[in-house]
Amino acid sequence: MPEPALYNSAYHFGGVIVPPGYKNHVIDGLGNPCGTGHVTGEDGSIAVGEESLTAARAQGRRVAETAAALKAGFAAKAK
């Protein structure tokens, strides 16, 4: 579980947390409920696998969709 103080710092500076959610099951296989991650090894020799890349793309898409929805909402509110 992530440290709540980390979230508090993000909120304080206007950050928005976009959790991975349970919508896309491609993330499930990586064993981390907090999101996609990869350990490269001490010397960076462990390449990122296709499963991790697919999960990272899915999370990136989710962040982009959330940002677009927020932007549209703010634009509608400004009218």
Image: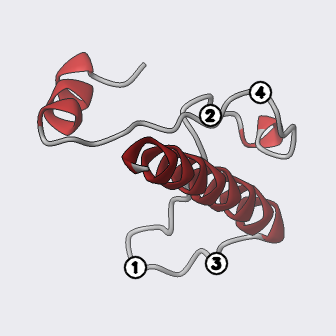
As shown in the figure, which amino acid type bears the numbered disc 2? Asn
Q: Are marks 1 and 3 in contact (CB under 8 Å)?
A: no
Q: Which residue position is annotated with label 2?
A: 32
As shown in the figure, which amino acid type bears the numbered disc 4? Tyr
Residue 16 tag number: none
Q: Are marks 4 and 1 in contact (CB under 8 Å)?
A: no
Q: How far, Cα to Cα, is label 4 from label 1?
A: 33 Å
Say whether disc 2 or disc 4 marks the residue closer to the N-terminus: 4
Residue 40: % across, % down: 50, 69
Q: How far, Cα to Cα, is label 1 from label 2?
A: 23 Å
Say whether disc 3 or disc 4 marks the residue closer to the N-terminus: 4
Q: Is residue 27 left or right of residue 33?
A: right
Residue 47 tag number: 3
As shown in the figure, which amino acid type bears the numbered disc 1? Asp
Q: Residue at x 77, y 27 (%)?
A: 22
Q: How far, Cα to Cα, is label 1 from label 3?
A: 11 Å
Which dot, 2 or 4, sits closer to the camera? 4
Task: Report which quarter residue 52 is drawn in.
Answer: bottom right
Residue 70: % across, % down: 50, 46
